[in-house]
Amino acid sequence: MTGIESTGSPAGAGLRPAWAASRSQVGLVVLLFALAGVGWWWTVRQMHGMDDGPWTGLGTFGWFLGVWVVMMAAMMFPSVAPTVALYARMSGKSRLLPLAFTAGYAPGSGADVLRADVAGEAIRLVRVLRVTLAASGASVPGDLSRELDALLALMLLQHARRDARVRYDGDRPRLVLLPDQDRSRWHADEIEEALDLLGPHVLAPGSPYLLEALVAAEHAVAPSPGATDWGRIAARYAELEDLTGSPVVRLNRAVAVAEADGPLAGLALLDGLDLPGHRLPAVRGELFRRAGREPAARAAFARALELCGNDAERAHLEERLGSG
């Protein structure tokens, strides 16, 4: 009978739903999820600049531990109802999957501009998750499938720029911002794969990963910085802000609006914005400078420098502070 399996117990006493699990299975899965929680806790500490001292580096390790143990639970006990789909929903709702990629793409501390191996491993894990879901036989909602496609596309579009995002001053890595990057060094094959992933979803209802990926795609298809459609990017960010209410999205929207409509329009969007870390004062500094408000720009860059824990980004901020 559908959804029922026999355990071999006499008189049918052991009949139970196919998804049911023994107490030992459930207990082990709970333990694995607890370990995942510890791993993700380490990651959150790193992302908020709390991963210092002897614990430095455990944030990235913790994310991989979290993903690994959950995937192990899915593969070891596929009968636990239904673990793979549960994890996919959890990861999509909680935005846990991008944390490891962000730790590689834009490390919050240390000397590296990027950690390409960490970002690449995060991409591999998203691929594994997509394959695992497809092979599990679990019913995957269309919006979840779309978000995983969009997440992979987003990561690929950002990772494709890795070689152009860093230059070296002797042995010291320096950050190269998007407008200054040599676009011939972008990985065209990864961009093409990402655009193929996004193609079927361009007209779909807006969702967080999809909108972020569509923004990244605007940058990827522009042949030069001057050809970037900043008005469309600003509109995507406005839609994303309506969905999420995220101050990070507001910051990114302000940058796009400043490019489209001028620095004062961007600064107006930043009024009253509260966002920890160095990126808000760094953006304020750039916009103040473009608006001709040099004392305010220098003060903002100095504040950003105080808050920044990444050596390469600090070097960039020092250059901006000294160039006024």
Image: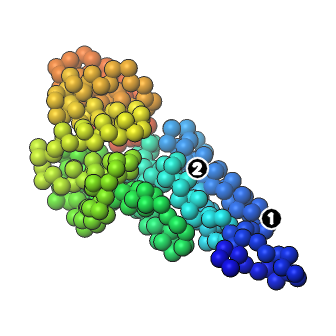
Numbered mark located on residue 23 in the image: 1
Residue under the image location 21 percent in, 50 percent down: 218
Residue occupied by mark 2: 40
Residue under the image location 88 percent in, 82 percent down: 10
Identify the residue at the far right of this view: 10
Q: Secondary structure at mark 2?
A: helix
Answer few, some or many: residues within 10 Å of disc 2's Cα (few below 14, many 20 plus, some between 14 and 19).
many
Identify the residue at the far front of this view: 1
Instruction: Give the x, y percent position of residue 280.
Output: 36, 29
175 vs 196: above or below: above
Residue 268 left/right relative to 9:
left
Amino acid type, label 1: Arg
Amino acid type, label 2: Trp
Q: Quadrant of residue 293?
A: top left
Q: Secondary structure at mark 1?
A: helix
Q: Nearer the viewer, mark 1 or mark 2?
A: 1
Answer few, some or many: residues within 10 Å of disc 1's Cα (few below 14, many 20 plus, some between 14 and 19).
few
